[in-house]
Amino acid sequence: MLAFSTISQLGFVLAAPVVGGFYALTDGLVKSALFLIAGVLPSRDFKQLQQQPIENKIWLVLAIASFSISGFPLLSGFGAKVLTSKNLLPWQAIAMNIAALGTAISFAKFIFLPHQSFHRQGKESELEKKKQLQPGFWWAMVILLGGLAAVNVFYYEAYTITNTIKPLVTIALGWLAYLLIFKKLVIKLPRYFEQLDHLMGVMSLMLILLFWIVWTQTQYLT
């Protein structure tokens, strides 16, 4: 899911290249945190995670990162999405709004995972706890998630009533759609396209497409 989300977020970068650097920075901070968190989850199967509560501390950092990429205010994901939307062409706006709704639905999977406070006992569980909650992990979370809050300060102009209401409505609709429809829906994507030769072919096509875009834009400017 995180890998597919990373690819989809590139759409926001390509849709508004002028501000793509800020969006890429924000997504990089979020994905770095989420990939690290995935390493300490008890499972990478969403069905198992929905039945096996995770520790409150893990859920908290997971939720903060998911809030940011969903565009929630007070985190840089909000500013990045607002700044991108201000630089979209009219025909791009509908597609990007649908993509933002899809992002909110996708990361609702993380936000609504069951969680609780753990008080483990026993030698084996204590070793497992130490493995999951290493100090280096928390320092990384402080830096990455702190960066999401700090970078957000540089775009304080985004905080208008209109700009704030729109992402909140999008997130609310995404959560509602997830709880009513997508939570019980299981989609298994085939591994066929993950084979090396297929990946190389797709990447080659994307490089040709990007080269063509740059070439046509250069001709237009000259």
Image: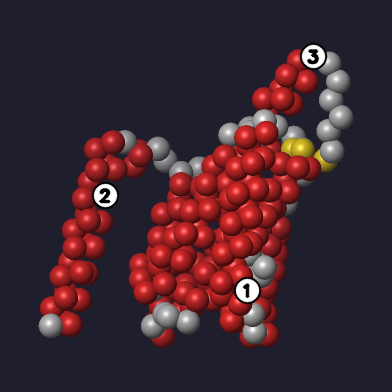
User: Which amino acid, by three-letter code, is at mark 2?
Assistant: Val
What's the CA distance linking mark 1 and mark 3?
Answer: 46 Å
User: Which amino acid, by three-letter code, is at mark 3?
Assistant: Lys
Residue 172: percent from the left, percent from the top? 69, 69
Q: Nearer the viewer, mark 3 or mark 2?
A: 3
Q: Is residue 30 visible?
A: yes
What's the CA distance linking mark 3 and mark 2?
Answer: 49 Å
Please report whichever mark, 2 or 1, sits nearer to the chain's N-terminal start.
Answer: 1
What's the CA distance linking mark 2 and mark 1?
Answer: 32 Å
Residue under pointer 2: 202
Residue 154: percent from the left, percent from the top? 56, 72
Q: Residues within 10 Å of mark 1 (few under 14, many from 20)?
A: many
Quarter-wise, where is residue 220 in the image? bottom left
Residue 182: percent from the left, percent from the top? 63, 55
Quarter-wise, where is residue 131 in the image? top right
Residue under pointer 3: 123
Rendered image: mark on residue 10: none
Q: Residues within 10 Å of mark 3 (few under 14, many from 20)?
A: few
Please report whichever mark, 1 or 3, sits nearer to the chain's N-terminal start.
Answer: 3
Cβ atoms under marks 2 and 1 closer than 8 Å: no
Quarter-wise, where is residue 190 in the image? top left
Cβ atoms under marks 1 and 3 closer than 8 Å: no
Residue under pointer 1: 167
